Image (spheres, helix red, strand yellow):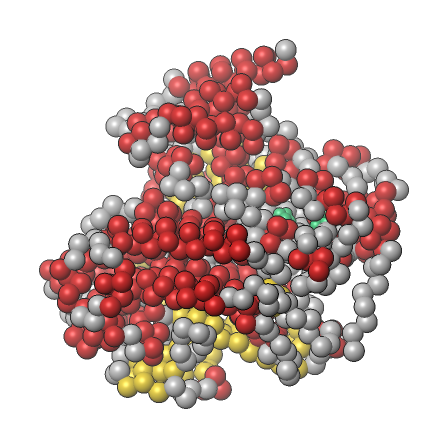
């Protein structure tokens, strides 16, 4: 029986089906699409650099980086300077960080009876937006990454500015999220120890424990991440067993008759993507500990996402230290893209998980473009027999409010899902 | 003299507004600003910046300050259509927990799908309630193109299953003013790029009420906030150009107020990203800048609280506040050059001002831009 139709950001519906007062299946339906893949067809390769950031205004930067890397992979031996790589990685980190803040303060907190704290969400978000703008000109929707590098010619002054944005954001974390200095927190190995701290994160974790929700939102305990860079590793984790040899060839997209969002599976199985998945693949001690104690639950998922803020801020500082300003920002590709007949793909870690772009070019014209978004992984609309990741996490719950919380703990976002 | 009568006009508008009931009797914006630790001086500095952005004389600052305090008299309804949420994101970036964001937080958007906590039944009820309760008084801001005609159930949300188009029409009916925020609701946006698979169109094409376009992909937070303040202050619609864009924000070409303009005039161009010219801040025309064909105030207002803007970062403008820029302003990293006549404003963009365009004057100098750069226009051949 359909109990209620509930809406999420963007355009999606959840149809909750109950049996004996417990949710036994949830239908996920996306009601709209903008058809960007269709729009890209027959356009010039570089048009994708303008169009794709607009697939999503929330993680548009990840789409830019995925696009530029997909196009670059069409070349055989395209050169990129380390400086360009580092700068791209920094802007992507900043986008992830600001997304996590917004998710925590705007989406998660209200579920625990707290007032939605817009200012707490916007303050660090703005700092990170500024840091991206300092490199890319504006945020959202920059196009500063081009095939061959980045266009910004940054100076020592810009570096100082960006460092200061990072410091201010770290300070916000220490003053609000977990009230302890970040070094201590980064070194923390025991998830339960967090419960002794004060701050917005510990408060929520304590609340989860108090409300007997430690076992909530468990799914398949299967994680995957394809994006690789100087921080993230590529791999999958099955019940904490990690393997790094995975191939995009085993990723399959399939149509769902009732929805505009396609399902995604790896070797025909549904996998969770996102910060928890990344931490499991990266073997982040604190998160692995939470997982050992509480499994792939609400607790671990929230902890992983918030902890990633701190890790990325910390890693970004190291990245900046390594930038050699004398290196080129851009190295002209050997030949013009209009002469290129080739295909390529890319995978980057966006805020909500692995984002994949695939492109086929014929003399520089896009013949086919495919985008697989993170939300597609977590929200695949499976069947009763084989539910998707978030669907499975909701089965067995007895009230819709909690189900919604569980659903949103995956940071679902339908904006680019239906591209 | 002129500014005197304007001053009086705006004053009496604000007087009228102050007689309207507040949305929430308990709080006031001035109290809130104080509580959040802003001094009166900081508040006035903010008002001063807003005043200059709206192209009003500095002596109008107290009026703008008062307008901010009265922002709680006008409810705001924000609708999402087919879009990427980038405009809302831009809005979320209004200044360091600042006065803009405070005000936006406080007037608290009677209905905003991304920001509000409500969902489902309750969300839809909020919207209907806001529209009913504030009939004729609310400001409607719409983000996103209207997918129109492809399928009956497109963008159907909420328990009553209204289509996006229907919601937009209904909300437009009794709004005090309607603003299309962003290039999508202004002109259709990226989803309307060829072949426009969802048949997306501008908000102005589905309602017969006047729509003010605030394009940009996304528009800067200052253009969004400025639009709101302009309406609070004047109570009337702003002066518009031929694309219904407020002149205070879209009156000048990017090219006219560009920080690299001196380089353009001196014939100093970046020939290739990463070259010496790029390092020295030369003009980006030859690597595809569409600034000469684009009307917006980016160079002055910049983005992310004045941090930067695309041209400052070394990427040319791509004309995001012009209709159909996806299809008409390609190739992205090459100058429009001799394709000038197939572009915005039928090619007039290059040297027409927003005023002249409606009249359709073809200036000889339109060709000037291309010719100017043509001296070394031929890109070096690649192997
Ligand atoms: S062409 Fe572009 S970069 Fe050059 S002066 Fe004009 S707007 Fe500025
Ligand atoms: S510089 Fe041009 S492309 Fe960039 S935001 Fe402004 S109008 Fe849009």
Q: Which residue is drawn at 37% across and 50% down?
A: A168
Residue A232 x/y as whole percent: 40, 74
The picture quadrant where one finds residue A333 is bottom right
Q: How many marks?
A: 0
Q: Give whichever of A23, A276 is nearer the camera.
A: A276
Q: Indicate the quadrant containing the N terminus of chain A: top left, top right, bottom left or bottom right.
A: bottom left
Q: Can residue A214 be seen in this view?
A: yes
Q: Is residue B183 left or right of residue A199?
A: right
The answer to whether residue A64 is above or below residue A136 is below
Residue A280 x/y as whole percent: 30, 77
Residue B362 x/y as whole percent: 85, 40
The picture quadrant where one finds residue B301 is top right
Residue A115 x/y as whole percent: 25, 45
The answer to whether residue B218 is above or below residue A352 is above
Q: Give whichever of A167, A411 is nearer the camera.
A: A167
Q: Which residue is drawn at 31% across and 52% down?
A: A171
Q: In this view, does B250 lie to the left or right of A309?
A: right
The picture quadrant where one finds residue A267 is bottom left
Q: Which residue is drawn at 41% across and 28% down?
A: B43
Q: Is residue A87 left or right of residue B1?
A: left
Q: Give whichever of A58, A230 is nearer the camera.
A: A230
Q: Residue at x 48, y 24 (%)?
A: B64
Q: Can residue B153 be seen in this view?
A: no
The answer to whether residue B256 is above or below residue A3 is above
The answer to whether residue B172 is above or below residue A225 is above
């Amino acid at each position: 029986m359909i109990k209620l139709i509930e809406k999420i950001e963007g355009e999606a519906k959840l149809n909750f089906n109950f049996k004996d007062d417990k949710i036994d299946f949830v239908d996920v339906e996306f009601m709209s699409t903008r058809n960007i893949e269709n729009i890209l067809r027959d356009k010039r390769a570089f048009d994708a650099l303008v169009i794709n950031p607009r697939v999503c205004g929330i993680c548009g930067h990840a789409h830019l980086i995925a696009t530029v890397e997909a196009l670059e992979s069409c070349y055989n031996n395209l050169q990129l300077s380390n400086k360009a790589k580092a700068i791209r990685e920094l802007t992507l980190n900043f986008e992830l960080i600001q997304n996590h803040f917004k998710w925590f303060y705007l989406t998660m907190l209200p579920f625990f009876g707290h007032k939605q704290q817009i200012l707490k969400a916007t303050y660090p978000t703005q700092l990170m937006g500024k840091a991206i703008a300092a490199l890319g000109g504006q945020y959202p929707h920059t196009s500063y990454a081009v095939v061959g590098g980045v266009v910004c010619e940054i100076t020592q002054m810009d570096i100082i500015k960006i460092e200061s944005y990072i410091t201010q954001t770290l300070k916000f974390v220490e003053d609000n999220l977990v009230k302890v200095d970040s070094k201590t927190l980064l070194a923390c190995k025991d998830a339960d120890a967090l419960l002794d701290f004060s701050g917005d994160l510990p408060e929520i974790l304590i609340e989860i424990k108090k409300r007997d929700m430690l076992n909530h939102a468990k799914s398949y305990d299967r994680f995957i991440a394809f994006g690789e860079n100087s921080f993230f590793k590529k791999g999958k984790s099955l019940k904490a067993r990690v393997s790094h040899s995975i191939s995009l060839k085993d990723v399959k997209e399939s149509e769902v008759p009732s929805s505009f969002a396609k399902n995604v599976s790896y070797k025909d199985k549904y996998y969770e993507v996102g910060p928890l998945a990344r931490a499991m693949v990266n073997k982040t001690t604190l998160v692995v500990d939470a997982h050992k104690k509480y499994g792939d639950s609400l607790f671990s998922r929230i902890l992983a996402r918030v902890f990633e803020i701190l890790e990325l801020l910390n890693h970004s500082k190291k990245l900046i230290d390594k930038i050699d300003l004398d290196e080129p920002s851009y190295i002209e590709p050997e030949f013009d893209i209009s002469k290129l007949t080739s295909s390529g793909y890319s995978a980057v870690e966006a805020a909500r998980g692995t984002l994949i772009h695939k492109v086929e070019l014929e003399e520089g014209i896009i013949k086919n473009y495919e985008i697989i978004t993170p939300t597609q992984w977590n929200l695949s609309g499976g069947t009763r027999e084989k539910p998707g990741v978030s669907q499975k996490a909701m089965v067995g719950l007895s009230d819709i409010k909690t189900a919604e919380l569980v659903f949103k703990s995956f940071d679902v976002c339908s904006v680019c899902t239906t591209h | 003299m002129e500014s005197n009568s304007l001053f009086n006009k705006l004053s009496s508008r604000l007087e009228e507004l102050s007689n309207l009931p507040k949305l929430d009797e308990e709080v006031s914006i001035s109290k809130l600003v104080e509580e959040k630790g802003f001094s009166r001086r900081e508040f006035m500095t903010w008002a001063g910046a807003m005043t200059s952005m709206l192209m009003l004389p500095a002596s109008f600052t107290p009026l703008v300050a008062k307008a901010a305090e009265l922002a709680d008299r006008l409810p705001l309804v924000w609708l999402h259509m087919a879009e990427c949420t980038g405009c809302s994101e831009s809005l979320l970036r209004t200044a360091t927990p600042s006065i803009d964001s405070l005000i936006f937080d406080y007037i608290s958007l009677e209905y905003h799908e991304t920001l509000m906590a409500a969902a489902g039944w309750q969300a839809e009820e909020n919207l209907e309630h806001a529209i009913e309760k504030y009939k004729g008084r609310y400001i409607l801001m719409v983000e996103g193109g209207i997918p129109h005609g492809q399928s009956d159930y497109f963008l159907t949300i909420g328990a009553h299953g209204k289509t996006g188009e229907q919601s937009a029409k209904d909300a437009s009916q009794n709004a005090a003013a309607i603003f299309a925020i962003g290039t999508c609701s202004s002109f259709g946006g990226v989803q309307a790029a060829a072949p426009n698979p969802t048949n997306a169109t501008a908000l102005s094409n589905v309602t017969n009420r006047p729509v003010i376009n605030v394009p940009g992909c996304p528009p800067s937070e200052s253009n969004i906030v400025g639009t709101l303040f302009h309406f609070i202050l004047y109570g009337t619609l702003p002066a518009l150009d031929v694309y219904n864009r407020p002149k205070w924000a879209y009156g000048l070409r990017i090219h006219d107020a560009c920080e690299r303009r001196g380089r353009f005039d001196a014939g100093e161009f970046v020939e290739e990203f990463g070259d010496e010219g790029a390092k020295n801040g030369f003009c980006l025309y030859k690597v595809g800048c569409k600034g000469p064909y684009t009307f917006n105030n980016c160079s002055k207002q910049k983005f992310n609280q004045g941090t930067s803007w695309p041209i400052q970062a070394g990427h040319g403008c791509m004309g995001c506040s012009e209709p159909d820029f996806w299809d008409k302003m390609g190739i992205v990293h090459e100058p429009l050059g001799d394709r000038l006549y197939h572009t915005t404003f039928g090619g007039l963009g290059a040297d027409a001002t927003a005023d002249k365009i409606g009249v359709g004057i073809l200036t000889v100098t339109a060709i000037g831009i291309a010719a100017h750069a043509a001296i070394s226009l031929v890109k070096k051949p690649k192997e």
